[in-house]
Image (tube, grey):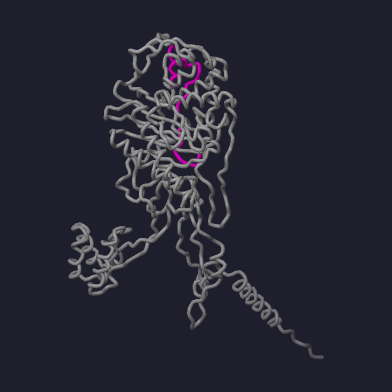
Amino acid sequence: MSKVKKNKRGNPWILFLFFFTVISVTLVARHCYPDSRVVQRSRHQYWRKVNLQSTRGIIQDVKGNALVISDTIPSFAVDPSILEEKDLEKFSGILSGDLLTKIQTAIEKKSRFMWLEHKVKDENEAEKYKSIKKELSDPRALIEIDEPYRKYTNNNLMSHVLGFCDADNKGQAGIEQVWDNTLYNPSGQKIVVRRPGSQPALLFENEIEQRTVTPVITLTLDSRMQYVVEKHLFKAAQDNGAKWAVCVCMDPNTGEIFAMASYPTYDPQNRKSLTIESLSNSVVSRGYEPGSTFKPIYLGIALERGWAKPDELFFCPAKLKVADGFIRESNSNVAMGNIDTADLLIKSSNVGMAQIGIRAEKTKTYESLLALGFGRESDIELPGIARGILPYPENWRGITPANIAIGQGLAVTPLQLITAMGAIVNGGKLMSPYIVKEAINSQGEVVYKGTPKIMREVYTPETAAWIRRAMRRVVLEGTGKRAATEVTELAGKTGTAQVPEGGKYSRNRYVASFIGFWPYDAPKYLMLVVIGEPSSGRIYGGELAAPTFKSIVEEMAELEYYAMNR
């Protein structure tokens, strides 16, 4: 009987199944889990994302007038690889010898790109480049590139508030810096699909356009009022050789800022004008001794605390010995004799105010001044906010309490002073100052709204009304007569402060100021004018700052009249 032989080579289907499994796994892996580099390359063959040019947002005044906009400006470069040497002489009238030499070297090295000039603002110069392009052997050698450009429509008007941007359109000062993230408009992307044998097709174009809008920051400032303020303030500063000057105007009832100016100024479109002195917005960043403009604020505290009475009499010699020093009247040779409390403001008596300062309790005075915002940073929407200097009460030794009563021995910012004075003008409420009305981001969302905010009540209405009446008499019969005008009834207070120097007060460096409000019966405006360190010989607030204040008020009244009757 014969035996059947077994197949020792095995079952061929097993081998087939093995190869089938390997191929299947590979195909699934390649199609469902491809290498990321392969995916990237394939996408570039068929579709890709292209960045769109971004534009920075708009800054406008309260009336909707554009103050800062984004534009494009031409920049010029060359392609040395196709620029012929004989064409170099055509650039001689517009480029320096050093740059021409560098271009010559670039031609020899066959470089492909070289910048000639970024952001050509001069239209005539830009036209020269364009004329040269037509004359070149190969016009492609001169490359014109439109670059984003920040345009300040009124040149240096309110430059300290607006600020400026760097070469990359990044905010470096003012509103441009604080609101940089809001003003930045994301460049966005468009999706381009390529089909074999056809032109690229754009997908989702409408959706992209609808997703972004131009950001807008609306300020509380009125550019017309700002122009008037800057015109008169800068003239006064220049005519009197002042080192610095400020003016700020606000609504005392809401804290809304109408105008804010600082001297010296700068042109945000001209980097050569940027100096350390000109860049400082002194309204918010400069601390100075306020002198007699501080007296209404301090006297209000004294009346509230019971350290002075409205009908009290003060004996005021020409000078008063206080601890380790003397307090003198502005005219140290003239004694005022017996004067009442209101006359301490009307005649601006240092000796009378010093007597109140000696009576006052140090800790309570410090607390009251702190409550008024001194020694604290304001929350206004600007950079570089200074706290000023308010010494701790344990350091009020010797003559210091008397000095503080007359506006010496502490440092305030103009914004702090006008904010505190606003509480007197509006009946006792300390308002938070604000300069931004509204902010809209690139998604069309309102991300901020400036609204009146009461920080605290610091005076009773009766005390505030008494101080206002005294300040009205300052203009009618006292040191502020030169601020009086026929266009409106106003009230105010003069100030003349010596500048501390080397532990003493300088005899030739002064700060002249005037702070006032109008109309007297229903105040709508509160304004502070400060002329820092004039060198013309006029040093008193009544003779220097008060007339400047008057000029601004009168021209602002004209603006208001024409606005109502046009």
Depth check, front residue: 194 or 436: 436
Residue 388 is one of the magenta-drawn residues: yes
Depth check, front residue: 447 or 170: 447
Q: Position of residue 486 (x, y in %)?
A: 42, 35
Q: Name the chief secondary structure element in magenta.
A: loop
Identify the residue at image location x=53%, y=46%.
Answer: 437
Q: Where does the magenta region start and end?
A: 380-406
What is the residue that sits farthest to the bottom in this orientation? 1
Identify the residue at image location x=63%, y=77%.
Answer: 23
Image position of 543 (left or right of 34): left
Q: Where is residue 361 in the image (x, y as percent from the top left)?
A: 54, 14
Q: In the picture shown, does residue 533 fall above or below 116?
A: above
- Quadrant (top left, top right, bottom left, bottom right) of the N terminus: bottom right
Image position of 93 (left or right of 475): left
Depth check, front residue: 84 or 215: 215
Q: Quadrant of residue 367?
A: top right
